[in-house]
Image (spheres, grey):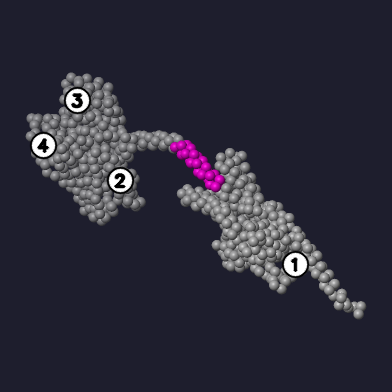
Amino acid sequence: MGGFLTPPDRPRWGFMRYLLMLLLSLPMLAGAVEFDEFTQSLPLGRVMQVFEDASGQATIADVSSPAMAGSFKAHDKPTLNAGYSRSAFWLKIDLSYRPANPSIRHTWLLELAYPPLDHLELYLPDEAGGYRLAQRTGDALPFASRQIRQNNYLFDLSFAPYEQKTLFLRLQSQGSVQAPVTLWSSTAYLEAQPVRLYVLGLIYGVLLGMLVYNLFIYLSVRDTSYLYYILYIASFGLYQVSVNGAAVEYFWPDNPWWANAATPFFIGAAALFGSQFARSFLQTARHSRWVDRLLLVLILCSAVVVALSLMTSYALALRLATALALIFTVVIFVSGIVAWCRGMRVARYFIIAWSAFLVGGIINTLMVLGYLPNMFLTMYSSQIGSAIEVALLSLALADRINSMREQQAQTLFDAGQKLEVLNQQLAHSNRLKDEFLATLTHELRTPMNGVIGSLELMQTLDLDPELEQYQQTAAGSARDMMRMVNGILTLTELQAGKLCAQRETFSLRSLLDALLGQFSANASAKGLGFDVDLAAGLPDRLLGDRGKVSQCLECLLDNAIKFTRVGGLVLRVTGKPAAPGRMAMTFAVIDTGIGFVNLDEASLYQRFFQLDGSMTREYGGLGVGLAICRQLVDLLGGHLTHESEPGRGSCFRLEVTCDLGGEQPMTAQPALRVRSARRMPQDCSVLLVDDNSINQLVIRGMLLKLGYQVRTAENARGALALLRRESVDAVLLDCQIEQAEALKLCDQVHGMPGCSGLPVLLVSASVHGLEAERCLLDYLSWPVKFEELQSLLARRVLAPEQGESAGI
């Protein structure tokens, strides 16, 4: 009996049991927080109790048992911030609803405002006196696992009037463990969301606006600094939406693995592109090699973090990414300071911008590590700092553009100055080149004149057929060489602007006869026909630049013969009145040569232009003929056009307007006044004035061959002295002397007694610059041909009266 309680003892034992339970529950009753229907939001950080389960094995039955009541510790901070911890944390919250008006019904929301938590479980009391799992969620689970679809964790709680509840929250995460817990009235929660959304919208709007703005600038200027900056903004913005839970809600709600991996991935990407942006923007490779190397190391570390976020555990990757973020902000800030010290103007904006980001990043990182409380400012400090930083960096980029424009303007100015100096040097070099070519070609003429003159004299000798063939070959080659020399000289004179159009009276028939005689032999040697088709009724005496017209036609005829294998060529001359006293002349050179495809004039009339490289090898020539023609025709105010068809030939038309010389058409022959007795060469003496011994020797030899008596003088003074001593029948003047000296000599000769009608004949490479009408009617051009000299002297010396009226 002693081992059992008697019936009177049982009530006593029951009372003691309830008293013990009441005593054990006193701590819980003492910690309950009361709220009523007027409560809007109730932060629970300072009223909850926390139990750290280091092993993570405790169950709800364990932690809710009376024996574990002493293991919970009161929390005296607004937010639980355990930092990086592998422990599971149990939060015990006692709530007591004490409404003033029990008839008013309210709904309540429990918010845990830290989206990066991996695992979160809510336990509520059940009807049996135990606890049941009311909700299991976290970013390690799909977004659909959340009771209320929000980026933060929300749980619906119901309270009856005067009801008291104790609820448990279990937290566990591979990242930082934060628990800002708040009890909200559902109405108050909805009213508070717009402010939060406005702040986040402003932050993300700034990021997005700056991204688009800089994207457009990059597309315009193609500066790689903008590209790196755009990638940095994109990476950092995606990191922000990933941390805030918006990415899980809108971008990847069904991919828990990527929801965790995205955070360290975008941190690493932001550090990578931010470092590369700093290198490009601050030009560290030029200003500071050690800073540049440091940034390269940081880029390498960022790439490693990006790779590890995809390959290793979330816990390791996130810790590395957090350390990288701290190092990144410090290194970038130091880089800006160094660049500023090196004199970079844009570095000041860079430092201010990164200062804002640095402060925000440090605050957020310290909050994550548990050194600062979790509140709105610390939670969103990095976003706010990044928005300020992005805006200021955009200003820095704009200032950089202005700085680059100033540098470019200065560079362009300096380059313009250097270019002007180079242009002056180039113009001087071109002038020296032109002068050298002119001097060279002029000097080449003298020996070539000697060669050609000597070959002309050989024609007067009786040669055997073999020597005659050699003589003809040498003479033809020498004339080709002289033609090329004349072409180069004309080209250099055109480039130097030394040529201008001259007005002189010339015989059209004489011009055509000279061309026919000059090119007939070449055409016959190739078995080609060469005809001159002269329209009826054209005047013979024209006033214009005979020399330049002749030179253009020589180039066209030479090309026609050169590029024609079979058939022939025709020089067709037509004309029509252009105005009273003026005649529009058209010289058409038509051949049956190889032709060519239609080329634009810029290419065809370009200097040294050949249809292909084989042209020079097969046909020879310098490729300057058409270029000279075009420039000479432009100088005369005419036009040069062409038509061609491959395999059928070409037609070049030279159109130039000349004044009429007052003569009759060539079809009408004037009456000749013939002397009663024709003089013989032996009865005539010719004064040869030439300062070049080779030219003097050649022309003197020709005159002697023709039977004339020859007197020689080397200059104008010697010629005048000889004319005072004896009389001559003609003066043959070599115009390699200066123009003024030649004209002065003509006037002096005609001013001497008995010499007013004395013929003064010119021998010159070009008489276009001389006022020939003042002192002569005919002239000879170098190289002098034996037959031309004989014909000229016969007209002007042996039968002068006939020559004056012949109109030849």
Q: Quadrant of the N terminus?
A: bottom right
Going 61% across and 56% down the picture, which residue do you hit? 267
Q: Main secondary structure of the magenta part?
A: helix
Task: From the viewer's side, name the closer residue of 547 and 296.
Answer: 296
How many C-alpha atoms fall within 10 Å of the one at disc 2: few (<14), some, or many (≥20)? many
Give x and y (percent) for residue 149. 58, 64
How many C-alpha atoms fall within 10 Å of the one at disc 4: few (<14), some, or many (≥20)? some
Q: Disc 3 to disc 2, how far (Cα)?
A: 49 Å
Disc 2 target residue: 605
Q: Disc 4 to disc 1, how far (Cα)?
A: 136 Å
Quadrant of the image occupied by residue 685: top left
Give x and y (percent) for residue 665. 11, 39
Magenta span of residues: 391-416
Q: Horizontally, is 605 left or right of 413 in the view?
A: left
Q: Disc 4 to disc 2, how far (Cα)?
A: 37 Å
Q: Disc 2 to disc 1, how far (Cα)?
A: 102 Å
Q: Report the disc number at residue 728.
A: 3
Quadrant of the image occupied by residue 733: top left
Q: Are marks 3 and 2 in contact (CB under 8 Å)?
A: no
Which numbered mark, 3 or 2, is in the foreground of this view? 2
Disc 4 target residue: 664
- The amino acid type of the residue labelled 1 equals Val
**Above or below 265: residue 798:** above
Residue 90 visible: yes
Going 57% across and 40% down the picture, which residue do you hit? 344
Q: Which of pointers 1 and 3 lies earlier in the amino acid sequence? A: 1
Q: Which of pointers 2 and 1 lies earlier in the amino acid sequence? A: 1
